[in-house]
Image (cartoon, coloured by chain):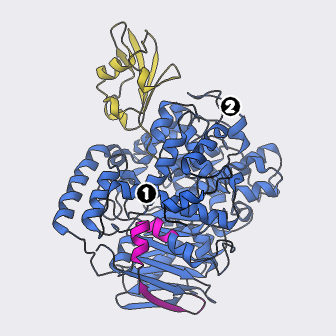
Amino acid sequence: MQVEVRVTGQLIDYFSGTHVNLTDGTNVEQALVTLEIPAASVGLVSVNGEAVPRAKRAQYGLVDGDHMVVMAPLTGG
Amino acid sequence: MSWQGRVLRVNLTLGEVTPEPLNMEWANDYIGERGLGTKYLWENMDPKVDAMSPDNVLIFATGPLTGTNASTSARYAVITKGPLTGAIACSNSGGKFGAELKYAGFDLLLVEGRSEKPVYLLIEGDEISLQSAEKVWGKSVWETDEWIKKQHHNPMLKIATIGVAGERGVRYAAIVNDLHRAAGRSGVGSVMGSKNLKAVAVRGTFGVRVKDPKRFMQVTNEMKNLLAKETGGLTKYGTNAMMDTMQEFGGLPTRNFQEVQFAGYDKVDARAMLKTDETGHRNLITNKACFGCTIACGRIAHIHKDHFTIQNRKEYWHASGGLEYETAFAFGPVIGVDDIDACTFAGYLMNEHGMDPISFGVTLAAAMELFEMGVITTDDTDGVPLNFGNAEALTVMSEKTGKQEGFGQVLGMGSRLMCQKYGHPELSMTVKGQEFAGYDSRALQGMGLGYATGNRGACHLKHDTFEVDMDDQSGEGKAEPCKSSQDWTAAVDSSGLCMFTMGAWGAPEFAEQLDAGCEGEWTAERLLESGERIWNLERMFNLAAGLTCADDTLPERLLKDPAPSGTAKGRVNELDKMLPEYYSLRGWSEQGEPMPQTLTRLGLD
C-alpha cells in the first residue's frame, strides 16, 4: 500500500519525499521505523488530520491512501 | 565563585552610582538573574507604584553562570514592574551584553529614580559614570549604539539601549543589546525610557572565576557534547522550523486567533527562508550564536533590494537579524501576511526602534479585526487600510509605532488598552495585558494554563508543556506538568544559561554545572525548590501590586469559540478544569494566594 507522508520542522532531514510504500497492515510505529525517523524525535503523528498519541502508535493501522503527518517536537522560541 | 560579588546601584534622581556588595544569602536562595533580580526588586520597591513612575526600579541581572564557558552563558534578565500589565516584568536576553557586564565586575545593576535629563550609564574599566544622552535622545537603537562607540573611541563597548519607542512610552518597548538581541517582552524598555535612561554601555576586562576550574571544564565539555546531539535542528533551521509543525497541528494563531491554521504559512516558514528565488536571492544568509553558545539558533537575513519595503532605502540593504518563530508568527499568520521580505523588514524595524514583535504583531492583529468590523476606518489609521494580509500596513505601522506617529500612537498602547478604547475588549488576545505568543491554547491546553497563570502575563517561555500538549489535546493531567515546568523554568532562567538547552539538559545536568562553578552545594532538588521559591515570590509581588485570581484567565474566544480546524478541531481551552487543580498543587488557596504553610516551606514568610 502507499501512504502519503509529510514531515515537519527538522524532520525533513530524515525524509524529504511525499509517499512511502508499506506492507499491508503496517501501523504508525512500524511506519516510523520504515522511514528511519527515531520515535524520540517525533512530537506527534496525525493520520488524515486525526492525532495519534504516542501510546497508540502501535495500535493504529494504516491503510492505502492515508495521509500521515510526522511532526517534530515543539521547543518554544 | 562565578560571582563578582558586586552590585551597582544607580540613583538617577541624584545622579549617583554606588557599588555595593552582592547579597550572597539572596544569591544562594534565588540562584541569580531572574530569581535574584526578583528578590532585589521585592526588597527595593513598593509593588503598588506606577510602573512609569520614578519609584519603579529597573534591574539588570546576570546569573551565576553568565560569562563562563558553559554553553549558552550569555543570558541576563531585566526585572521591573511592567507598564503593559502592572505585574512583575522579567525579560531575558542573549547577545554579548550580559557576559560583558559580568566582566566589568558587576553581577547586577539596580536603577532607581529618574534623571532630569537623558543620560546613559558608562562602565568602562574603572570609569563608572552617567553621561549626557541628549545628542541621541530621539535616535534609534542602531544610531545610539554607533554614536556611543564613536564617542568613546571604543568599538568593544557592548550596549543595551532603547529606541524612540522606549522614550515615548510604547508600552511594549524593548531594551535591545548588540543591535539585534533584546530583552523584548513586557515593556522593560518603556520603564527605562521613563527614567530618562537611554542606554547602558559596558566594557569589561575582568574574567570570571569558577569554583573548580578543572571539574567545570570537564563538566561543561560533557554538556556541550550532549547538547550537540539534541539541538542540531535549531542550529540548521532556527526556531522558525516550528511554523509548519504548528500549521499541521492546528495551533497556529491566525487573523487575531479567529483561526488556527494559515494557508500562507509556507511562504514565511524556515524552508521559505532557505529558498533561493529566480533572481538568486535567498532570505537567510547564515546563523549566529550569542556569547558562548554552541547551538547558534539566531538567524541573519537580508531583504531583496527591489522589495517595496526597501526600494531606494539603501540603509536597509545590509544583513540583520532574521525571522525567528515568534517574529514570523507575529508578522505573518496572526495578521494574515505571507510576504517574507515584509516580515523580515518589520523585524528590522522592531530592533531599530526597540519594540517587542509579539506584542506589536498581536496588537496590529486586533486593530485589523477592528478595521474589518468597521469599528475603525482609514480616517483613524492615517489612510492605511488595515485589512488582514496587507503587508504594506505591517511595515508602515511598524515605523509609525516605532516613531510614535499617527495611528502608531494607538498601536503603542498595546492590545488591551486599544481594544478597550474602541469598546471591544473581547478582541484583545492577552493575559494580564500582555499579548499571546504563537501557540493557540485550544490546541495546546497546558500552554493555555501557563498563559493564564503567567506572572508576567501571557508568555510561552515560563513553562514547558509542549510534549504533553502535543500528545494529548485535552486538559486532563496538564496542571502538574505546567506547575512543575514553571518552577523548573524559573530555575533555568536564573542560572545565566539559555532555556533552549532544556531539551538536552535536565535538573541534574544544570546542577552539576552550577555545583562545579559556584559556591554552595547545588543539587537538582535544591534547584527545583529555588525555582518554586522564585515563582511564588513573583506571585507575591503581583498580589501586592493588586492583581487577583481574576487575572488568571484567558480571552473568551479561547474559552468559548471551538478551534475551527486542526487536530484539536472542536475544542476550547479547559481552563475551568485545570486552574483549581493547579492552585491546589501550588499550595495556594482557592483565591490563588499562597497558603501560610507554602510560604513557610519556601522560606518566604
Q: Which residue is mark 2?
A: B562
- Colour of chain A, in one word, is yellow
B263 and B256: which one is in front?
B256
Q: Residue furthest top?
A: A24
Q: Residues within 10 Å of mark 1 (few under 14, many from 20)?
A: some
Q: Residue at x 61, y 87 (%)?
A: B115
Which of pointers 2 and 1 indicates the residue nearer the eye? 1
**Res B289 quadrant in image:** bottom left
State the SS at label 1.
helix
Position of residue B506 in the picture relative to residue B376 (left or right): left
Residue B516 visible in the picture: yes
Expressed as whole percent of the image width and height from the top left, the position of residue B9 reads: 49, 85
Asked whether the residues under the numbered discs 2 and 1 touch, taking CB atoms below 8 Å apart as contact, a structural biologist would say no
Q: Is residue B414 above or below residue B149?
A: above
* Label of residue B529 in the image: 1
Position of residue B406 in the picture relative to residue B11 (left or right): right
Quarter containing the N terminus of chain B? bottom left
Q: Residues within 10 Å of mark 2 (few under 14, many from 20)?
A: some
**Chain of the residue where label 2 is placed in the rendered structure:** B
Quarter containing the C terminus of chain B? bottom right
**Where does the magenta region start and end?**
B12-38
Q: Is residue A32 above or below residue B444?
A: above
Which chain wears blue?
A: B
**Chain of the residue where label 1 is placed in the rendered structure:** B
Q: Residue at x 36, y 65 (%)?
A: B74
